[in-house]
Amino acid sequence: MARRTVPHVAVRPLWRCRNCAAEWPCQPARLSLLVEYRGDRTALLLHLGTLMAEAAEHLARLNPGHVPDLHHRFLAWARARG
């Protein structure tokens, strides 16, 4: 019997990985995103920026008065190495 593969996607509004429960984007999700957006880093950063804004809104509603710094989690790792 084959095991069903659970993708590394965000569970909203918690922004945890459905597969491994790590903060999303987890390492496997990051790798998948880098592969998906290979050759178009700008599009990847725009996509992640949109998701970061959504996550900030969700997380602020869950924990009023505390807005986590999501830049490192969503964008810093995806910037082109120079």
Image (spheres, rainbow, N blue to C red):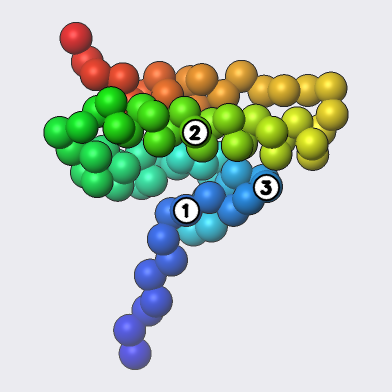
Find the distance from the CA under tag 2 to the CA under tag 3.
Answer: 15 Å
Residue at 22% x, 15% y: name it.
81
Instruction: Give the image quarter of residue 64.
Output: top right
- Tell me where residue 53 sits by quadrant: top right
Q: Quarter holding the C terminus?
A: top left
Viewer-nearest of discs 2 and 3: 2
In the image, farthest residue toward the left? 39
Instruction: Identify the element where label 2 is drawn.
Output: helix
Q: Nearer the viewer, residue 58 or 11?
A: 58
In screen coordinates, is 53 left or right of 3?
Answer: right
Instruction: State the image quarter where residue 60 is shown.
Output: top right
Residue ID at (58%, 47%): 16
Q: Does the residue at mark 1 contact the one at mark 3 (Cβ under 8 Å)? A: no
Disc 2: which residue: 50
Badge 3 amino acid: Pro
Q: Badge 2, how many Cα within 10 Å: few under 14, some, many 20+? A: few
Q: Can you give x and y, in whole percent of width and height, for residue 6 in the image?
A: 43, 66
Q: Residue furthest top?
A: 82
Dot 1 alpha-carbon crowd within 10 angstroms: few under 14, some 14 to 19, many 20 or more: some
For the N terminus, give its image quadrant. Answer: bottom left
Q: Residue 11: image x %, image y %? A: 59, 53
Whether residue 74 is visible here, answered yes or no, is no
Name which residue type carries label 2.
Answer: Thr
| Residue 13, numbered circle | 3
Query: What amino acid is found at the position of numbered circle 1 in the picture?
Result: Val
